[in-house]
Amino acid sequence: MAVDTRKIKLRRTTILYWSLLVYILAALLWWLISLENQNQRIRAEQLQLLELQASQLDPLEKERRVVAIESLASRNSTKYISEGITFLIVILIGAVGLFRAVRRQLRAQQQQQQFMMAVTHELKTPIAVTRLNLETMQRYKLEPEKQEKLIRIALDETSRLNFLTNNILVSSQLENKGFAGAKEDLDFSLLVKDCIKDMGNRFPGRLIESNIEPEIDLQGDSLLLQILLNNLLENAIKYSPAQSIISVQLKKAGTQVLLEVADQGEGILDTEKKKIFERFYRIGNEATRTTKGTGLGLYLCERIAHHHQASLSVRDNSPKGSVFRVNFAT
């Protein structure tokens, strides 16, 4: 229903926009025709007046005046046409700019609405699961093994909730131009290993292979870098088959530190590769999308990379899937 409402709003805006543009162009055309008619009327009156004075003028003078009248009329016609073309170009440029701005605004509103829907769902699910588990343990006397299982599930859901709230909080902070973040010397190799271990605990059924070069130091914000790697790993896990392998590589190449996270999923279309780093953007549409998410993860990764004077890019994996690479300058 919400998608249909947005489509109707966009259709109405488009119709209104084109109707207004057609009206403006019609008014411009009417103005040009009116000016040209006035120009031709003045020309005809001047030629008629010249004919009345013809008996008093010698042929050469009459011819000179006729040429002058025709030349003036021609110059006026050229001036009106050039002014009209100039106005037309200005109107079209402004109209195209306005149309794009309106579409961007509507798309941003649509993405924000989808984000709020996704966040509401993502927040409700772990809260509901945790509450259900706690109520079950409160009402029934369970065996220790079942209690431990319910507690573990509740802890996993609270970790998921914490991950989501961290993403939202950090996204808000990074939007603030005055945000500086912490700057400290880090053992980046150890940080990456810890993130992989934590992600393995969260998703025990997934296989994450790593090739981590030891003792790679980096200056930055440890919390932000953890969020960066966690989002890349979770993204790879969400968009790849359960039996596939997630690969993480960290190495130093000259003056750069290269971090790569590769998956064996369906990959990303070339037309989507730039869009995936936009805020709230998610591949697909709400009707066909099956994976959970808020559209903040990769946007956060790009902003955190930028905050550390690093670049984030994506390329196709072989034989299928995607490889996300972060280039840190040291």
Image: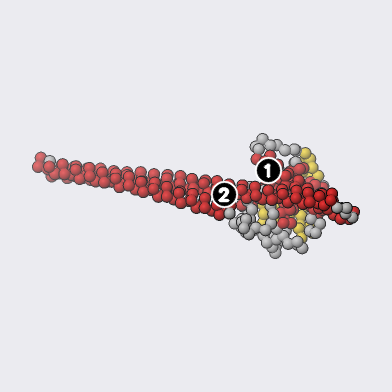
Q: Is residue 202 above or below residue 241?
A: above
Quadrant position of the C terminus in the picture = top right
- Residue found 66% across the figure and 35% down from its top: 178
Q: Earlier in the sequence, mark 1 or mark 2?
A: 2
Residue 171, label in figure: 1
Q: Nearer the viewer, residue 227 or 50?
A: 227
In screen coordinates, is 3 left or right of 298?
Answer: left
In screen coordinates, is 139 left or right of 82?
Answer: right
- Residue found 77% across the figure and 52% down from its top: 129
Measured from the top left, where is residue 197 in percent x and y? 82, 52
Measured from the top left, where is residue 269 in percent x and y? 62, 59
Amino acid type for the residue under numbered disc 2: Arg
Amino acid type for the residue under numbered disc 1: Ser
Bin the neighbour count of mark 2 within 10 Å (Cα to Cα): few under 14, some 14-19, many 20 and up.
some
Which residue matches tag 2? 107
| Disc number lying in front (1 or 2) | 2
Determine whether the residue tagged by mark 2 lies in a helix, strand or loop.
helix
Residue 12, label in figure: none
Measured from the top left, where is residue 329 in percent x and y? 71, 45
Residue at the right extreme of this rendering: 144
Residue at the front extreme of this rendering: 139
Measured from the top left, where is residue 298 in percent x and y? 68, 50
**Measured Cα–Cα span from mark 1 to mark 2:** 19 Å
Quadrant of the rendered image containing residue 306: top right
Quadrant position of the N terminus in the picture = bottom right
- Residue found 46% across the figure and 44% down from its top: 94
Quadrant of the rendered image containing residue 90: top left
